[in-house]
Image (cartoon, rainbow, N blue to C red):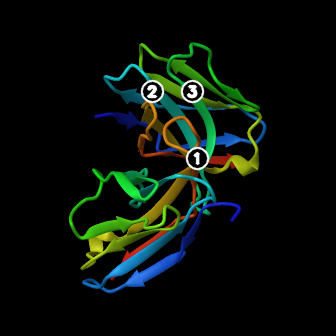
């Protein structure tokens, strides 16, 4: 596609449920990033993929959060046993490669846990 | 660890005027990049301008320019001839320069800019 696509745009879930957030990066981009943006804050890094492997997952807050990118393209962020504190906008970005090249962001998924 | 501080939660400017948004950062790294991103209500982060720390010359992109003071760890954004479409949240961000691998962005808390008629 022309840009980074994230689905769904909005997701409301009940506390304790499992959710999956999808990111479809720009075709050919090998690097993919997930960030979380809480209300009134800047985005915070969660995890970075280079190809299929997670090169840096130091930002994942706990073991309820997991992300995969099995074929080196689409990525899914998975959250188990959701809590109200998980409510935020989850942003995905991709770039041609790491480091010097510009990262392009999607429009995010707004997750609300009720 | 790096930190990025934006001390102006909100700013307002009249159309066609000039406004400066402030950003300071703290790092022990010597090689890094600094960015300003714009986030309109659509939530999509859009790159406005990028500065490489080893370059002394301040970056410019059309109406947008930066004042990069490496010793002071300051990186302000100047928007000239402000337009209504500039209304958005603006985030300052830091990225360590890695050779061959990606590096995460560290963002500030943002400045909400309102351009008025």
Name the side, left or right, on which B36 lies relative to A11.
right
Residues at circles 1 and 2 in contact by the CB criterion of under 8 Å: no
Instruction: Tell me the residue that label 2 is attached to.
Output: B32
The local secondary structure at tag 1 comes to loop
Task: Specify the quadrant of the image occupied by residue A66.
Answer: bottom left
Question: Could you say which is closer to the camera, residue B14 or residue B61?
Answer: B61
Q: Which chain's residue wears label 1?
A: A
Position of residue B35 relative to residue A9, above or below, is: above
Badge 3: residue crowd in 10 Å (few <14, some 14–19, many ≥20): many
Task: Specify the quadrant of the image occupied by residue B36.
Answer: top right
Give how far apart the Cα atoms at labels 3 and 2 are: 9 Å
Say if residue A9 shows up in the picture: yes
- Residue A29 is marked as none
Instruction: Tell me the residue that label 3 is attached to.
Output: B51
Instruction: Tell me the residue that label 1 is attached to.
Output: A96
Q: Which chain's residue wears label 3?
A: B
Question: Could you say which is closer to the camera, residue A111 or residue B90?
Answer: A111
Name the side, left or right, on which B97 lies relative to B28.
right
Say if residue A46 shows up in the picture: no
Position of residue B59 relative to residue A5, above or below, is: above
Badge 1: residue crowd in 10 Å (few <14, some 14–19, many ≥20): some
Q: Which chain's residue wears label 2?
A: B
């Amino acid at each position: 596609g022309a840009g980074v696509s994230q689905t769904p745009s909005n997701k409301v879930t009940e506390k304790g449920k499992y959710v999956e957030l999808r990111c479809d990066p720009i075709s050919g981009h090998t690097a993919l990033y997930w960030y979380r943006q809480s209300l009134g804050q800047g985005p915070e890094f969660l995890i970075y993929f280079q190809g299929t492997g997670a090169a840096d997952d130091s930002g994942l807050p706990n073991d309820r959060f997991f992300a995969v990118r099995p074929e080196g393209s689409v990525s899914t962020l998975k959250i188990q046993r959701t809590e109200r504190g998980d409510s935020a906008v989850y942003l995905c970005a991709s770039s041609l490669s790491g480091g010097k090249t510009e990262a392009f962001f999607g429009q995010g998924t707004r997750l609300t846990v009720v | 660890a790096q930190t990025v501080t934006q001390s102006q939660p909100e700013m307002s400017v009249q159309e066609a005027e000039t406004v400066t948004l402030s950003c300071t950062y703290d790092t022990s790294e010597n090689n890094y990049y600094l960015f300003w991103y714009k986030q309109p209500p659509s939530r999509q982060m859009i790159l406005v301008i990028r500065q490489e720390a080893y370059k002394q010359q301040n970056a410019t992109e059309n109406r947008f320019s930066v004042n990069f003071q490496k010793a002071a760890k300051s990186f302000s954004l100047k928007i000239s001839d402000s337009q209504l479409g500039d209304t958005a949240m603006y985030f300052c961000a830091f990225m360590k320069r890695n050779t061959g691998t990606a590096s995460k962005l560290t963002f500030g808390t943002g400045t909400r800019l309102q351009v008025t008629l």
